[in-house]
């Protein structure tokens, strides 16, 4: 039976990033990363996250993979009695050349994997789903993959998504809320470029967001009711392109679809604590919410950053991780992550529900908030700071 300092369950972006950073620190790692279907989604990463990727070596040259996001434009396209003003936010107001970069997930994952391959040290990759996770009397974990091979580790990391087996197995308490909305994503292009500006058309059942990418490509993130998006999914390409033009108020000319369309149901998942007793959760195993405010992968990579900090504080590089170390790491990680998870989760949840509310006082509050963000410079800068995760 092979023994390791750390076992990671989950082969997505957070799991891959963490595996490489741990290997670089001389920790022995077993990484359960079953082969995944190509992820056609993109992730808008804010500059603090991009700087972490650069400083850690995970992505030294963001311009090679990502497209810079320098402006955010918000257009109230609802038919409500009270409608907000159009607002334009520029990264230069926040003292940055850009807010961040828009990255294709399918390009980030091999970049993180290549970083791990380049590091000295020990890492065992198991391309199979975990079949059993158990705890022995001495507190050492036994992880059994689908081929019934056993692997021991002192620290266990669940990076296995919304339906996390690790979270369920170790009885982490959480609150979950299912929404009546889903998200439709695809890539397309308009006749006229949207430049380096992310444009959000706010509708009654969620935003219709256009995120710029390389070569005039646009990444669409459209939130609406399940029925509406499933009907859009069933349209012919020609009719769907016409729908895109209508939803964008015909501001950019004709649309041309470039990829397939995908629909994902939306939910909120809030953890009470993200680490305990030598087990930690990162990424969507620890938090999930609608794609509002570009917080999803940003938060997941902040999980990775905090876990690395906790391990560095508890166990020096190239030193084996003990069972006592694992307990200390999980407790320290939980303490580091709790304030951020509460703040960001509350921010996204409140923003999303305010967009959906037909309650007149809520509309007035949203309208007042947009006017304040548009007109009051210190408030805009505070919003920039929250949105960028710092």
Image (cartoon, rainbow, N blue to C red):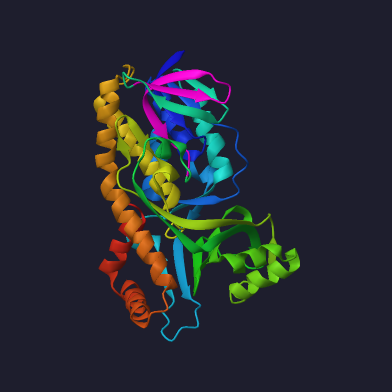
**Closest to the observer: 373 or 97?**
373
Task: Report whether 100 appears left or right of 364.
Answer: right
Task: Report whether 134 appears left or right of 336.
Answer: right
Residue 156 counted in the magenta span: yes
Tally the marks. 0
**Closest to the observer: 270 or 297?**
270
Residue 198 counted in the magenta span: no
Task: Name above or below for residue 191 compared with residue 9.
Answer: below
Magenta extent: 140-161
- Where residue 24 sits, quadrant-wise, is top left
- Where residue 105 sits, quadrant-wise, is top right
| Residue 372: image location, x then y, percent | 31, 75
- Where residue 134 sits, quadrant-wise, is top left
Q: Residue at x 69, y 56 (%)?
A: 258
| Residue 58: image location, x then y, percent | 45, 35
| Residue 72: image location, x then y, percent | 45, 65
């Amino acid at each position: 039976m092979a023994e390791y300092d750390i076992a990671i369950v989950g082969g997505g972006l957070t799991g891959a990033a963490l595996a490489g950073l741990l290997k670089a620190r001389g920790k022995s790692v077993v990484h359960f990363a079953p082969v995944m279907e190509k992820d056609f989604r993109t992730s808008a990463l804010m500059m603090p996250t991009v700087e972490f990727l650069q400083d850690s070596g995970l992505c030294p040259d963001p311009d090679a993979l990502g497209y810079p996001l320098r402006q955010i434009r918000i257009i109230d396209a609802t038919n409500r009695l009270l409608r907000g003003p159009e607002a334009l936010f520029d990264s230069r107001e926040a003292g940055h050349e850009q807010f961040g970069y828009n990255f294709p997930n399918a390009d980030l994952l091999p970049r993180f994997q290549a970083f791990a391959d380049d590091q000295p040290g020990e890492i065992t990759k198991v391309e199979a789903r975990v079949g059993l996770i158990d705890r022995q009397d001495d507190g050492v974990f036994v992880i059994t993959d689908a081929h019934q091979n056993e692997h021991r580790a002192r620290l266990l990391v669940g990076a296995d998504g919304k339906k996390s087996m690790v979270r369920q197995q170790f009885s982490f308490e959480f609150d979950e809320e299912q929404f009546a909305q889903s998200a439709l994503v695809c890539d397309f292009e308009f006749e006229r470029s949207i430049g380096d500006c992310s444009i959000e058309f706010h509708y009654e059942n969620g935003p219709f967001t256009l995120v710029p990418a390389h070569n005039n490509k646009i990444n669409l993130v459209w939130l609406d009711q399940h029925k509406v998006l499933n009907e859009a999914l069933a349209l012919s390409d020609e009719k769907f392109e016409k729908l895109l033009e209508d939803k964008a108020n015909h501001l950019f000319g004709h649309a041309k679809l470039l990829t397939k369309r995908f629909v994902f149901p939306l939910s909120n998942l809030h953890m009470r604590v993200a680490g305990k007793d030598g087990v930690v959760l990162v990424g969507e195993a620890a938090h999930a919410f609608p794609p509002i405010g570009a917080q999803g992968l940003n938060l997941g990579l902040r999980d990775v950053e905090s876990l690395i900090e906790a391990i560095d504080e508890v166990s020096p590089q190239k030193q084996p991780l003990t069972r006592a170390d694992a307990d200390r790491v999980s407790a320290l990680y939980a303490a580091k992550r709790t304030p951020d998870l509460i703040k960001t989760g509350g921010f996204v949840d409140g923003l999303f529900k305010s967009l959906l509310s037909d309650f007149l006082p809520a509309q007035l509050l949203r309208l007042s908030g947009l006017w304040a963000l548009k007109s009051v410079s210190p408030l805009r800068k505070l919003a920039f700071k929250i949105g960028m995760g710092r």
